[in-house]
Amino acid sequence: MTDEPAIDQEVQPVDADRAIYESMSRRTRRSFLAGGAALAVAAAGFELFNRGKPIGLLRRPLRAAEDFNGLVSEYVIGETRLAPTYPAESAIINPRTNGPFGMRDDLDLGSWRLQLSGLASPQTHPAYIDDVTSWKYSYLRSAKADGPEGKIAQPPSNMVGDNNKLSGAGSVMSSEPQLPSPLPSAPGVLLTMNDVQKMPFVEQTTEFKCIEGWSEITRFGGVRFRDFIAMYPPFRNRDGSLPRYAAMTSIDGAYFCGFEMASLMHPQTLLCFQMSGRDLTPGHGAPLRLAMPLKYGYKQIKQIARISYTNTKPEDYWASLGFDWHGGL
Ligand SMILES: Nc1nc2c(c(=O)[nH]1)N[C@H]1C(S)=C(S)[C@@H](COP(=O)(O)O)O[C@H]1N2
Ligand SMILES: [Mo]
């Protein structure tokens, strides 16, 4: 107990963030009321559970409860509080790797570009391209050994074991993803890691939680997604609002996540290229992944290749298998 790291409550908001922090404490109080309501719903619904038809991996009442939790997290809790932060020294040095889907451990990092679409005025950017999907990545191993370019990666053997422990998910986990969702062609920009690293560097030590039931204190380094949004502004709707969502896909499109814009604007959402003070390893999602300490690991997509802003709710890998689309803690 005593070597449990002290939670650092002294997160100092910069001025621009102050309004958010103030509304956070108000909203947190309100969320206790919502929590009470959720408990009542849970108690009443428990009996119905076994009668429900399965939807994806979850039975219907559980699915409904997940949707309800999603609403609570979206409108009441999720985007307005801060995850606790810890001293950098309390972070684990070699975090475990988990989740190999849609990844290529043989990606030639020099060939990596971020395909970014749904921008306000992409033509003004020097890296403008008519169709971001025309970019071809290259791989270090020969095409002969690995099959054609873009083939779904076979999980490297050191990354497989953990996934099979996800209860009830064994048959799904061992097969290829069912809903590969490569995003359609679109104009946009192709960014390099240098472009990403031009924004202010931030380090953040937070608890990383996987829905399988393990967690680790992890030190992430990267740039705030909200800075990235400011640097490469999304299109605006007629009423001036930002697009509702961003869709992201991993290198071969086989792992994909959707996010509310509010989640991406959260000050702890990072586009991340370091863990434990070192460059990301392939298993952890080199060169670029998300860190979102208010969401479960499955929303923290690794080896991002594509980000697209949209008003259409994006497909999500684990949501398509029955888990909550929001993945909030
Ligand atoms: N591309 C991709 N990203 C992914 C996954 C995956 O299978 N493929 N798994 C997710 C899950 S379930 C977890 S718990 C975390 C694990 O991150 P880590 O390997 O850095 O611990 O990655 C997430 N991001
Ligand atoms: Mo996970």
Image (cartoon, rainbow, N blue to C red):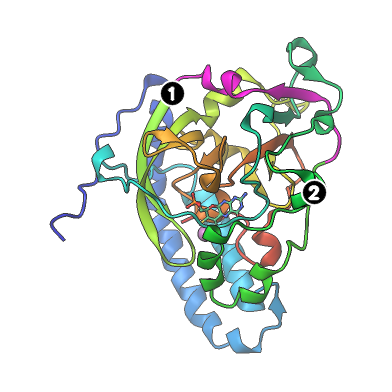
Q: Residue at x 30, y 45 (%)?
A: 91
Numbered circle sitting on residue 261: none
Farthest residue in the left direction? 2
The N terminus - image quarter: bottom left
Q: Residue at x 25, y 45 (%)?
A: 90
Which residue occupies the foreground of this view, 190 or 117? 190
- Mark 1 residue's CB less than 8 Å from ligand 1: no
Q: Which residues are magenta?
A: 184-200
Relative image position of residue 312 (x, y in whole percent): 77, 44
Which residue occupies the foreground of this view, 125 or 120? 125
C-alpha distance separating marks 2 and 1: 39 Å
Above-or-below relation of 107 to 156: above
Kindly report which numbered mark, 2 or 1, lies closer to the viewer in this rendering: 2
Asked whether disc 2 touches disc 1, contact meaning CB atoms under 8 Å apart, the reply is no
Say whether disc 2 or disc 1 marks the residue closer to the N-terminus.
Answer: 2
Relative image position of residue 11 (x, y in whole percent): 30, 33
Secondary structure at badge 1 equals strand
Relative image position of residue 6 (x, y in whole percent): 20, 47
Q: Looking at the picture, which amino acid does disc 1 mark?
A: Phe
Quarter of the figure with residue 111: top right
> Can residue 58 be seen?
no
Relative to 130, 124 lies left or right: left
Binning the other alpha carbons within 10 Å of mark 1 as few (below 14), some (14 to 19) or many (20 upward) gives: few
Numbered circle sitting on residue 144: 2
Q: Looking at the picture, which amino acid does disc 2 mark?
A: Lys
Residue on which the image places disc 1: 201
